[in-house]
């Protein structure tokens, strides 16, 4: 229970009781990270259902759908996305990029990339047909993205060896953690394909492409992963999944 509480306290704004961040509890915290996605997905599904009942227009629907994951996560992953964009846009050495990730100041590229990200994601939410099984597919997006992010965190080398991500991963039994997170991913993939082989498969393809980019980019540019890079991946993965669903829906409508 302490591990569950720590996961929600760290990666969400959902009120949690105070617990001691003991090594034993920290060692399992990332395994409960996907449950934060479950909570976000349930709120997102509730909004999609309410929007259908009240016939809410695409602009308001898209704005709230975009804000739900950011608000419930406290913006921690979007912060990592911005820091990573600053570092990538600097075109500096690997060491300098890692320093930029730790810099508390926000650069121009972070603001530009964040604005573009929110604009594109908002447009995608305005275009997606979030009803029926497609709504359930979209609900699973936050769960799958956090499962993949957690798996990368305990699988790929840590670029710095210190920081918040290292605090969570250092005391972990990595073999058991990987097993748990892989099971999360398998269940998510099975449910997505069971709901809709086309729409669910598109979401999986989008997530897969985000994983491929993240794996190559993190290794080449930073020599591993950090907490900020994990946030960058999570935001990119969720956008890629919604984008893939929108494209498939548009193709189905044309064909």
Image: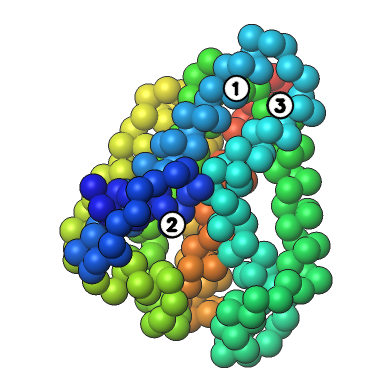
Q: Residue at x 60, y 38 (%)?
A: 68
The residue identified by callout 2 is 10
Q: Residue at x 42, y 31 (%)?
A: 192
**Residues packed near mark 3 inside 10 Å, few (<14), some (14 to 19) or many (20 plus):** many
Q: Which mark is residue 61?
A: 3
Q: Which mark is residue 48?
A: 1
Q: Residue furthest top?
A: 53
Question: Do residues under tags 1 and 3 come within 8 Å of each other at their CB atoms?
Answer: yes
| Left or right of 83, for residue 223 | left
Identify whether 99 is placed above or below 148: below
| Left or right of 5, for residue 15 | right
Identify whether 144 is placed above or below 88: above
Q: Looking at the image, how many numbered discs can be counted on the residues?
A: 3
Decide which of 24, 176 is in the foreground and name it.
Answer: 24
| 1 vs 2, front mark | 2
Report the colour scheme.
rainbow
Residue 149, by quadrant, is bottom left
Identify whether 215 is placed above or below 64: below
Question: Do residues under tags 1 and 2 come within 8 Å of each other at their CB atoms?
Answer: no
């Amino acid at each position: 229970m302490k591990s569950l509480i720590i996961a929600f306290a760290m990666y969400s704004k959902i009120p949690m009781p105070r617990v001691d961040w003991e090594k034993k509890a920290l060692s399992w915290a990332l395994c409960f990270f996907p449950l934060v996605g479950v909570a976000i997905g349930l709120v997102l599904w509730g909004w999609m259902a309410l929007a259908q009942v009240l016939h809410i227009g695409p602009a308001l629907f898209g704005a709230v759908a975009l804000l739900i994951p950011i608000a419930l996560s406290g913006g921690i992953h979007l912060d990592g996305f911005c820091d990573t964009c600053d570092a990538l846009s600097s075109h500096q050495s690997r060491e300098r990029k890692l320093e930029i990730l730790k810099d508390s100041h926000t650069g121009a590229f972070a603001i530009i990339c964040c604005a573009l990200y929110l604009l594109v994601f908002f447009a995608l939410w305005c275009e997606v047909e979030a009803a029926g099984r497609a709504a359930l597919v979209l609900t699973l997006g936050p769960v799958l993205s956090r499962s993949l992010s957690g798996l990368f965190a305990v699988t790929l080398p840590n670029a710095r060896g210190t920081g918040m991500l290292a605090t969570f991963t250092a005391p972990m039994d990595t073999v058991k953690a990987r097993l748990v997170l892989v099971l999360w991913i398998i269940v998510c993939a099975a449910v997505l394909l069971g709901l809709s082989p086309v729409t669910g498969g598109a979401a999986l393809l989008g997530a897969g492409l985000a994983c491929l980019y993240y794996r190559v980019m993190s290794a080449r540019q930073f020599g591993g992963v950090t907490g900020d890079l994990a946030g960058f991946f999570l935001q990119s993965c969720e956008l890629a999944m919604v984008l893939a669903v929108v494209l498939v829906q548009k193709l189905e409508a044309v064909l």
